[in-house]
Every structure is written in C-alpha cells, then in structure tokens.
Image (tube, coloured by chain):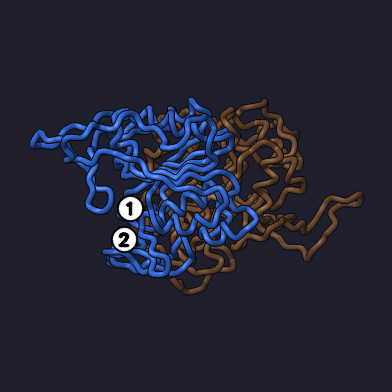
Chain colours: A blue, B brown
Amino acid sequence: MTDPEALPSPAGWICTVCGAGVPPGDGQSGPGSCVACGADPQAIEIAAAILLVAGRGAYEDLSKLLAGDDAPKGRILDLTGDAALSRMLERAAGYRAGRIVRQAAGDTGTTPAGPFRLPVEDATATFDHLLLRNLLFCAEDPWAVVDEIARRLAPRGTFVLQEIFPWPIPAITAESPPGEDGVARTRPVSGGVRYPLRFEIGADVIDRFASWGVMAEFYRPGLALDPAYRRAVLVGERS
Amino acid sequence: MSEPPATLAHPAVMNRPPELSFAGMCTMCGNKGTFSGVRSPSRESFPCPSCRATLRYREQAGAILSVFSHGRSHFLDHFRHQPECQRLAILEAAIRGPFIRRFKDVPGYVRSYYFEDAVPGETRDGVICQDLERMTFADASFDLIITSDVMEHVFDVDAVIAETARVLRPGGAHIFSVPMVFPLRPGSTARARRGPGGVEHLAEPRYHRSGLDEPSLVVTDFGADLAARHAERGLRARFHRSMPLTAVLNGNAVVVARRPLQ
C-alpha cells in the first residue's frame, strides 16, 4: 500500500503571493518557500486567505488580484510583519504596514503589554482590510483583541488572522495550563522569538466576532491536500 | 435539475487513466488516502477511494465546514453529528447526491425539486416541489441552502439569487457548485433564454443529466460577475477554494453567498 504521506504534491505547489511554482516543503507536507518572491509557507497561507476574503476567490495569486479591476482600493493595514507580503501589497493604494510591540517570553524587566491596541490613530471603522498574525494566544485578554479588530473594521471590511490554533479547536476559549514542569508554556513564532502561550482559542471566538456583526470562520487552505495539515487562518468580513 | 450521483464519474473522465495522484484528506468522509484522477475536468474526478465523492462535492463539503463548523470539524461525517450542524435549518435542492444521507437525520433538513407536474409546496416522496425562482418558504427560513450544479440550468438567475436572499437567515449561506473555468471569465454568458414561443437558444444547446436522469439544458456559463450579482441583492458572495495552494486543483471552487448578520 502506498504511504499517502510519501506521494508528491498535486502537480506542484504555487505561490499565492506571486504565482510562481514552489518546491515542496519538508516532508512534502505542503509548499516550501517561494524562490521567486521569498514568501514562506506561512505567507503563502495568509495570501490564500487574503485572496478568499478580499479577492472574493476570483484570483489565483496576489499579483493578479492587485493588477486586476478588483484590486483592494480601501485602507489596508498589514501587521503581519512579513516582508514578502509587504513587498507585494505595497502595490495597492492605501496600504500601510506596521508592527505590534509585544513582550517576548523570557524577557525580563519589561512591562507586559496591555490590551492589544492597533498602533495607529484611534478611530472606529478605520480599515477595509486588516492583516494580522500571532495575536490571540499570547494576549492578556483575547476578547479585547477581538473587539479591537472588529471595532476597527469598516463596513464590509475584512480581516485575516494567522496563528497556531489548537487542533481540534475547543468549544470554549480557556487559559492555557502550564507545562508539566509547572513553567508557563511558550510558542515559537518567527526568528527564534517565543511568545507566552496564555490562551487556547476556542470556537466561541466566532460568536464574539458575530456580536460585532463580523462573519468569521476558520479557513484551512491545506486541509484537503495534506493528511498532516493542522493549521487554520481566521478570516472574517464585517456586515 | 442536474445532479449526477457522487459515485458516477463525469462522462468526460470515465475510462480515462489517472493522470495524477496526490495524498489528501476527504472533507466528506475524513478518509486519508490517495486521490487519483484526471487534470481536466478535475471537478468531476479524483473520487475519494472510500466514499467516492468527487472533487466538486468535496469542495462543497469544505465550504460548509468553513462557514458552519466553527473550526471544530474537519470532515462532514463528523460535523453532521455535532450540535452546530443539528441545529441548522437546511434546504437542499436535490433528489440525489452525497449530502442527502448525511443530512437526513438533521431535524431541520428539507429537500426540494422542481416537479413540472406538481404544485409548488406539494410534497412527493419526502421532497417538496419548489421553483427556485419563486419559493413558497417564509422569509429567513434557512441557515444553509445547498445546490449542486443546479444554477446553470435556471432561466432567471437573478430571481433565484433574490429568493435565496429572502429565505436565508442572517449569517446564512447558499453554497453551490456550478461548472466554471479558471481564470474566471469576467462576465456570465447566456446560452438560452425564455421567449414568447418557448426556449430560445443563443448558443449550441448543451445538456447535463438531471436528477431524474433526463437531459437538462445548460442556460448560463458563469463568470466572475456572480459575486456582483449577489451583492446587488444583498448577499456577499465569494468563490471558495479548498485547494488554493496547488497549480492544477486550485481552479476548483464553489460559490458561497452569505446573508450579512446585520
């Protein structure tokens, strides 16, 4: 019997950022990084989610979306910190990138970040598209983060939030228990940085968004193609 | 309307040797295995080795899970037993297909079909006669409406969109498959229309098999304007892709048209 994990990818992975072909990743469990634009698998996944909610699924990659008539014309705030995404999205009018300052696990002598606030001028319905990464699990109050995302979305605005959600996703969001050794757990994000794992995000995050009139869902762009796939991107659109 | 059974391959791909195999998971039954099929038309190919659901049905299952499972189910045979599914009011316009046996135990699941010799609203063998252009259901009756390769056969697409917008609850979704080519054409093309003397053909007639195994005329070849046509009637539509990361299979999509929450 053929080992499903050993089969090749379905005729090649593509980069949803630039459209180039992408070699398989380690263990062939999904795409690797794009040689053409430098997008890593996480950026490729975020781009797939952007294409779904901001591009309405009508385009194969961001370069085509941005060159087409349906290119996002509103205010885009990118807080993913991803260089490949930023290079591509800079083509869109209204694009701006920023960074969220958070306390990395193990830092000492610093004050833990307060409730998440977007690092831009304070106003409701500010953005048409919000691109976010690694926010909820490490937040002191994940509901404050959800509320802030929803509050800042303009009517019909969309958001994309990528992070490592639990598998399977529990019904209720709960504080993450400490590790077996009693030490608070952390989670690697990028560049060797680890953030504290404070919460296991549950399905009730969908209901919290709904209370703001935001239709949110977990999008799993690799689920049908990879038996080992465990990730998800939280996406949503404001009514 | 057209509703080939999930277990029967499309005539265009029958008897053709597989061109491609890949490892994956069936979003219908959860089987993890090898999916083999032909590149074009791939939507009618790559049957699940366990439940035989072809790609387009699995695309629909993936979209249903994305919209309604709150991330808690990864295949439909798991989701259908969950409270999130059991409390849904579901309308499926079909008399056969893979969703029927999966949703038949959901209390709010009803099926419809357009029987030309029945009165709309009349039930026949558990299936309600409905004209999708003029449904008899009350406003905001359903959370989920499923149609599989039906929309390309209706004569007044905009009337059907308006009706689905009317009978969907806030947050509800019409999740449907239609044949499409990618990259998407900008606009839809009418292949036929109703005229004073009957059907007027605007292109060479093309037929699919209906749920009653009769020829069913293809009326429209759809394009990207489907999203705008839904928006004009208050629905947010997108082309949901379950396999956006691959070069061959990313062209498959189903349409998810949601009624906003507010």
Q: Nearer the viewer, residue A233 or B141?
A: A233
Tag 1 secondary structure: loop
Q: Image quadrant for the C terminus of chain A?
A: top right
Question: Mark 2 — on which chain does it sit?
Answer: A
Tag 2 secondary structure: loop
Q: Position of residue A100 (x, y in %)?
A: 36, 41
Q: Position of residue B223 (x, y in %)?
A: 67, 56
Q: Residue furthest right?
A: B196
Q: Are marks 2 and 1 on the same chain?
A: yes
Quadrant location of residue B237?
Answer: top right
- Residue indicated by mark 2: A29
Q: Is residue B248 left or right of residue B184?
A: left
First in sequence, mark 2 or 1: give its number: 2
Q: Is residue A35 above or below residue A204?
A: below
Q: Position of residue A44 (x, y in %)?
A: 41, 57
The type of residue carrying mark 1 is Tyr
In this orientation, does residue B254 appear? Answer: no
Labelled pair 2, 1 in contact (Cβ < 8 Å)? yes
Q: Position of residue B95 (x, y in %)?
A: 60, 44
Q: Image quadrant for the N terminus of chain A?
A: bottom left
Question: Mark 1 — on which chain does it sit?
Answer: A
- Residue indicated by mark 1: A229
Q: Is residue A134 left or right of residue B201?
A: left
Q: Is residue A81 above or below residue B81?
A: below
Q: Is residue B138 above or below residue A219?
A: above
In this orientation, does residue A192 appear? Answer: yes
